Amino acid sequence: MSFQKKNDMLRFMFNSIRGIVSAKSSEAVFIQSGDIEWDITMPLNDLGSLTINRECRIFTWLYHREDQMRLFGFSDAIRRATFLEILKVEGIGPKGAVKIMSGISQDDLENALEAGNLSRLEAVPGLGKKTAQKMLLSLKGKLVHSQEITIKTSPYNDLVEALAAMGYDRRAVSEALAMAETAIKNEGTSLSDAEREKLMFKEAIVYLSGAQ
């Protein structure tokens, strides 16, 4: 089995870690969870929300290669999703993605990509003109828009991910699910969670396909 395949299998072995912040530096946080102290690399913006001796939950991603393993952490699932999208840009590795996310807030990054603001991206430490252009071409419309998505609880997050995996724009997916949810509520039909999820998925695809 290739190391890439191993990494794909292992990266979500740990979805998140909950524990006490025992220490932190400019690049990492140390989380005491039971008898284990985790050393987790994090973007500076995410580290700022953590307080030593306080409990926290860190969403994680495991980097696994032949010569090293490294655990990366994020303050929430949206930040981790952003990191994974940045990794898809040619020429950007985990360390580079963390540096980029340390130099720009989530809202500023989303807004710059949505507006096609190349100069704002170029101003981010670690981003040259060529890489900023690649990010703009690769990620516009791909990030979760934290201020615009109103469907944030299970099972709708799973629906967002499933539809995005089919190639639909995340923003359009969120809007389609919101419309589907409203339509179902207006019908006044009593449904189980599983039935509601299936119906919302079907209705969202209808909206996304432009059939309505």
Image: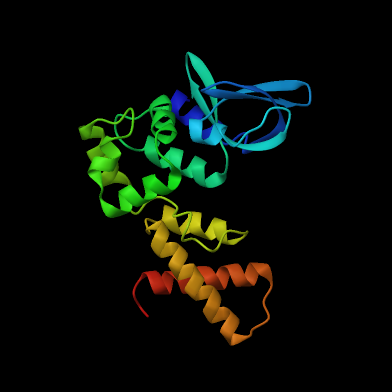
Residue 203: x and y in percent read 48, 74
**Tag count:** 0
- Whether residue 43 is visible, yes or no, is no
Q: Is residue 100 above or below residue 201?
A: above
- Looking at this view, is 71 or 192 the one in front? 71
Instruction: Name the colour scheme.
Output: rainbow
Residue 118: x and y in percent read 24, 43
Residue 13: x and y in percent read 61, 34
Side of 66 where 109 appears, left or right? left
- Whether residue 92 is visible, yes or no, is yes
- Tell me the residue at 24%/30% (across/down): 128
Give the residue at the far bottom of this rendering.
187
Quarter of the image containing the C terminus?
bottom left
Side of 185 where 36 appears, left or right? right
- Tell me the residue at 29%/35% (across/down): 123
- Tell me the residue at 29%/31% (across/down): 127
